Image (cartoon, rainbow, N blue to C red):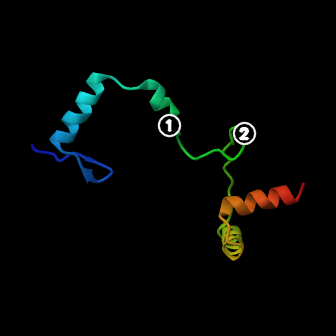
Amino acid sequence: MNAKRTIQGHPVTEAQIEAWAAEAERGFDIPALKKRGRGRPGRAASASQVVSLRFTDAELAVIDARAKRDNLTRSELIRAAVMSSS
């Protein structure tokens, strides 16, 4: 069986696999790898926490309409609402 290898839908060639293997055999620059950012950039000096909320379809419609009107994302709108109530 000749299964095609892909990464996120893009074909991976034998040459690319060989190049990755050669790179791994040479060793990786660990300090350089640790410098790379992972995930989304931080919003503050300390890590942010993800909080799950449940909204009805009607509530989401109101949130989305207001966010669109104010040119904000859902998250930005909810954060602004929380901060304005303190």
Distance Cα–Cα, label 2 vs label 1? 17 Å
Relative height, residue 43 to residue 20 (above, below): below
> In terms of secondary structure, where does tag 2 sit?
loop
Relative height, residue 60 to residue 13 (above, below): below
Report which quarter residue 81 is drawn in: bottom right
Q: Amino acid at mark 1?
A: Arg
Q: Nearer the viewer, residue 57 or 2?
A: 2
> In terms of secondary structure, where does tag 1 sit?
loop
Residue 11 pos. (x, y %): 22, 50
Ranked by sequence position, the earlier of labels 2 and 1 is 1
Q: Give residue 4's mark.
A: none
Residue pointed to by mark 2: 45
Label 2: how many Cα within 10 Å (few below 14, some 14–19, many 20+):
few
Image quadrant containing the C terminus: bottom right
Residue pointed to by mark 1: 36
Q: Is residue 68 left or right of residue 37?
A: right
Residue 70 pos. (x, y %): 72, 73
Relative height, residue 29 to residue 15 (above, below): above
- Residue at (72%, 39%) from the top-left corner? 45
